[in-house]
Image (cartoon, helix red, strand yellow):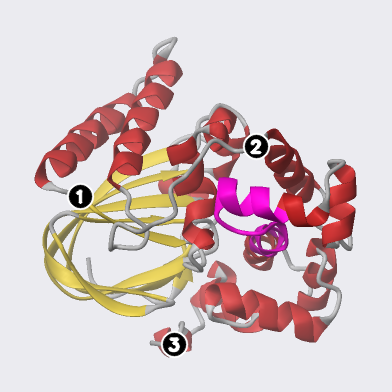
């Protein structure tokens, strides 16, 4: 694949059907693939070759066995690739609210796809290193998924979700967020944490304070913070900031609303606060993010408008 302009991947480019928003693909990269963003979860697994992976953290060399999970709104790019063979599995975040809603209760899966990429301030990007046996198992599962997504027979959707879960489970068992075996050990989420998280997700515009959240779940604020950190690895207000930033990223690329309107929609009515908080998650202000990744503008944008190196 040759270098492309900075852009956003749309769902119609990735998913065969919105009914089960899941897509599996393979790519061999030589040269560079410019920065891009998307409004779905992406799992990228390197099966061979060499290259550089660029995110908000800068550039890291990648080769066989490297894998990445990117939450909606996160951007990344590949540079100076030499036969970099990448297997992608992308799925809509709504699966986490429907068929897969229960995985947020699971210590490993909930941490990996819910709070882990943010608990250590990774701002939506979680790297994983797979040993050879784990890599082979994941690649085999992706091959099965690729065939399953094209199966239109009755009951095929069950097989699709089942195989997706087996892939995610294998990735979760290989995750080490600190890279030095001192990562936060996920525990089963406390019911009050789950209630609070779902309330925050559903009412982003509300001017939340810690006291308001604690009152909603009938719990002392300091105790709720401790439970949140034990269960999710981050405090409730940081969880709220993450949810707002992801929603804002989606609205910036999917709607024509002004930046200030979007800020109010997600609960950050002050433009300066919105800009600084959004930038803390994605490395770009809301305006720069829209200019870089909005597919409606990308055709007229130069790749130099992309995220900073």
Who comes first in sequence, dot 2 or dot 1? 1
Graded by Cα atoms within 10 Å as few (under 14), some (14 to 19) or many (20 or more), the crowding at tag 1 reads many
Residue 280 part of the magenta-drawn span = no
- Is residue 236 left or right of 309 when viewed as pictured? right
Q: x, y (%) of residue 47?
A: 14, 52
Give the distance between the C-alpha atoms of the residues marked 3 and 2, in whole angstroms.
39 Å
SS of the residue at dot 1?
Answer: loop
- Please tell me in which quadrant of the rendered image residue 233 appears: bottom right
Q: Main secondary structure of the magenta part?
A: helix
Residue bounds of the magenta highlight? 225-243
Q: Which mark is residue 308?
A: 3
Q: Give whichever of 211, 32 is nearer the camera.
A: 211
Q: x, y (%) of residue 106?
A: 50, 33
Give the distance between the C-alpha atoms of the residues marked 3 and 1, in whole angstroms.
28 Å
* Residue at 79%, 71% in the rendered image: 263
Q: Is residue 214 above or below residue 189?
A: below
Determine which residue is flagged by label 2: 190
Determine which residue is flagged by label 1: 130
* Residue at 33%, 29% in the rendered image: 166
């Amino acid at each position: 694949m040759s270098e492309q302009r900075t852009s956003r991947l749309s769902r119609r480019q990735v998913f065969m059907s919105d009914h089960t928003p899941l897509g599996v693909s393979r790519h061999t990269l030589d040269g560079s693939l410019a920065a891009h963003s998307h409004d779905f979860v992406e799992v990228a697994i390197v099966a061979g070759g060499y290259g550089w992976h660029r995110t908000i953290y800068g550039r890291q060399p990648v080769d066989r066995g490297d894998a990445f999970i990117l939450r909606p709104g996160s951007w990344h790019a590949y540079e100076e690739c030499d036969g970099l063979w990448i297997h992608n599995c992308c799925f809509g975040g709504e699966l986490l609210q429907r068929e897969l809603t229960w995985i947020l209760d699971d210590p490993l899966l909930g941490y990996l796809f819910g709070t882990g990429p943010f608990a250590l301030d990774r701002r939506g990007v979680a790297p994983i290193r797979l040993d050879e046996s784990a890599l082979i198992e994941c690649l085999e599962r992706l091959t099965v998924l690729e065939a399953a997504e094209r199966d239109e027979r009755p009951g095929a959707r069950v097989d699709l979700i089942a195989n997706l879960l087996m892939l995610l489970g294998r990735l979760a068992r290989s995750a080490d967020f600190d890279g030095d075996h001192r990562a936060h050990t996920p525990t089963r989420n406390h019911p009050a944490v789950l209630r609070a998280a779902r309330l925050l997700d559903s009412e982003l515009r509300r001017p939340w304070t810690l006291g308001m959240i604690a009152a909603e779940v009938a719990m002392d604020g300091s105790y709720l913070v401790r439970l949140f950190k034990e269960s999710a690895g981050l405090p409730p207000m940081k969880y709220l900031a993450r949810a707002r930033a992801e929603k804002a990223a989606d609205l910036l690329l999917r709607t024509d609303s002004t930046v200030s309107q979007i800020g109010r929609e997600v609960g950050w009515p002050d433009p300066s606060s919105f800009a600084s908080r959004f930038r803390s998650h994605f490395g770009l202000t809301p305006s720069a993010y829209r200019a870089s990744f909005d597919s409606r503008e990308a055709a007229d944008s130069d790749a130099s408008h992309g995220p900073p190196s």
